[in-house]
Image: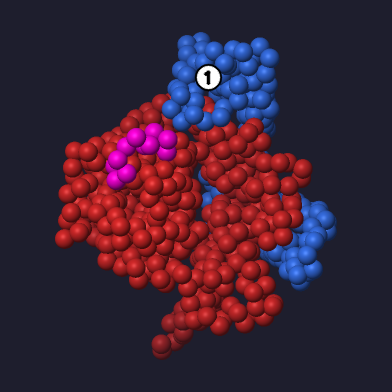
Amino acid sequence: MEAFDGLLLVLSPDVLPFLILGVAVGMVFGALPGLDATTGIALLLPVTYAMEPVAALVFFSALYVGGVFAGSITAILFRTPGSSEAIMTAIEGHQFTMRGEARIALSTAVYCSAIGGLLASVALFLITPFLASVALKFGPAEYFALGLVGISCIAAITADNPVKGAIAALIGLLLATVGIDQLTGVKRFDFQVTSLLSGVPFVPAIIGLFAASEVYRRIAVRETRLVSEAVEGSAERRTRGISLIEFLRLRWTILRSSVIGLCVGILPGAGATTAAILGYAAEVRMSRDRSGFGKGRIEGVAAPESANNAATVGAMIPLLSLGIPGSGTTAVMMGAFLIHNLQPGPFLFLRERELVYGLFSGIALSNALILALAFIFIRLFTRLTLVPYPVLATGILSIAVAGSLAYGDTTAVMIMLIFAVLGLALEAGGYPLAPVVLGLVLGPIVETSMRRALLMSDFDPFIFVESPIAAGLILIALAFFVGPLIAGPLRRLRAGRGDAPGS
Amino acid sequence: MSLSRSARSRFGALALPGLTLLGCVYLWGVTGDFRAVSGRYEAIGPEFFPRLLIGALAIMCLVQIARSLLRPAETTAEEADAAAASGSVDWRNLVTALAITGLYAASLHTVGFLIATPLFQAALLGIVFKTRRLVTLVLVPLLFTAAIAALFIGAMNAPLPRGRWLFGTFSRLFY
């Protein structure tokens, strides 16, 4: 009944326009490299001061949902993740564009984002109190184990050449140690550059690694054909999105990734980017044939897109039920609650039930709205691919620079440029880029949690296996690491037996 | 000015891990300066995790170099794909594009975003992409700069640099 009242509240003329506007504005922020939902919410926070609390909060949650989805549009079309949550989509989805099948990846991203978010919204209504209590049990040992699970997926992504994959991941992990050490306050690898004290700025780094490096690669190999030729493909493949049969085959991928995204989103600090990586990793692990991952597998688009949108919903759970923000964006959103004299937490459920259920309904409807609005935005961005490549490349580099500047001073642009050269060098040598990002994202979680856990236990390493959650996660990580090492010899052994006479 | 496929393969197999190995030696030395004040962190201080990673990275680079020297003919599918996709490399064009971007980034603080951006775009179009149409060379940079400035400065209030002296005065006419 309360859920129905919440739905009616959101559908009222005072709130519904802000819901639609929120998704649209979020898509603009999400699709532009360097700007994301967090920036959008932070910039528009003062604008909502005069609004009704429910309208303002629904507007921001819709902006968050729209922003996380829209990162995938430019990720697929230009290998330029509009937001960090779309990293894995850029790696897998852009391969479709290069094959002339961008529409398959784009439509998959739309449907999976919407369904992932909607599934998580159902969970938001049903299991918020239970899931919030599980998240409270996560201490440093559990976070360390969770980080290990994420890193272990490198073994699967780079099955062709695990040594190169490990080198790329270690470079990413090492880059994540730049800046002030969170535990001791000691400066590390800052090289007297003030901007590096807070660590390698993530957004300029991924803009450089993916967007700018792709432009420089094309410049280096003089590949200046229209991107539309790649997007549209040949006449017989033109305008085809994902078919119903293809989509139904993804049902378990979507369900699995949505559950992963929801669970990761609930954990404070983990975020939708980690959810997308873990969703992708789980999909690679579960697949019988892993050879096509990284070269354009539809599951590789469906999994991160379902997971990251589910994580945006999951991140609202600890914020609303415990008053703990589950991500950077929800931390900024907490400011929206506070300027409207609302304190997120258990008392919010007691005092403002209608508002809470209105917000739940708003989040669910925002995910459904993706289906309606996404195709308009996709059409707009696809038109961009008709622009001649020199003009497009100039535009991409200019937006990459402006996007980096939005995150800091001109040092951020230099960092973007350094990462572009790093990306170019790694790709030229046949080193995968995904593990670098994986290391960069998961490095702080792994290092800080490991050291905190060891300090708490007086350097007793058994702390990592004492808790059933941590022990279980470490076992999963070990299986992920060791699996590919023994899978190859086992396959050869089986093949050898199969070839034997009489077998 | 091009790089052959075998040269690219050697770059991935030997040069890149070799350079990374040298980097590891340097960075290991840098970690010597990380000293925590509190004795509580002696066992797992600020240098603990970076050294662990540097050590592992150095070992992996040595493994990669050893693999390449012991099995030089072996080219993984990934390397083959990378080599096939990249064709011949125009180093002069690449270095020019990187230098123009670097110069642009370095000049932003002094010249400001509104003046540096159209110059950067015109330089990229004219020098790197060899565009000769005057309309494209003039109109595209002006339109792009106006659009990006409207979006980042007007709508998003992003702190794009104004520049100094006369350039700063010019930028202040707009934002």
Among the 4 quarters of the image, the one containing residue A432: bottom right
B7 horizontally vs A483: left or right: right
Instruction: Answer whether residue A52 is magenta in the image.
Output: yes
Q: Which chain is red?
A: A
Count residues near mark 1 (Cα–Cα under 10 Å), then give few for <14, some for 14-19, many for 20+. few
A430 horizontally vs B38: left or right: left
Instruction: Answer whether residue A46 is magenta in the image.
Output: yes
Q: Name the residue that disc number 1 marks.
A: B175
Residue at the image point whose x is 45% and y is 36% from the top: A43
Residue at the image point whose x is 59% and y is 12% from the top: B170
Image coordinates for residue B49, horizontal then vertical, percent: 70, 64
With respect to residue A131, does A120 lie above or below?
above
Q: What's drawn in magenta, residue-wise?
A: A45-55
Taking depth in this image into account, of B137 and B147 the one nearest to the observer is B147
The three-letter code of the residue at mark 1 reads: Tyr
Chain letter of the residue carrying label 1: B
With respect to residue A15, does B112 lie above or below?
above
**Residue A240 in view of the camera:** no
Image coordinates for residue A459, horizontal then vertical, percent: 69, 77
Q: Main secondary structure of the magenta part?
A: helix
Taking depth in this image into account, of B144 and A13 the one nearest to the observer is A13
Q: Which chain is blue?
A: B
Residue at the image point whose x is 41% and y is 87% from the top: A503
Image coordinates for residue B13, horizontal then vertical, percent: 68, 55
Can you say which quadrant of the picture contains the N terminus of chain B? Answer: top right
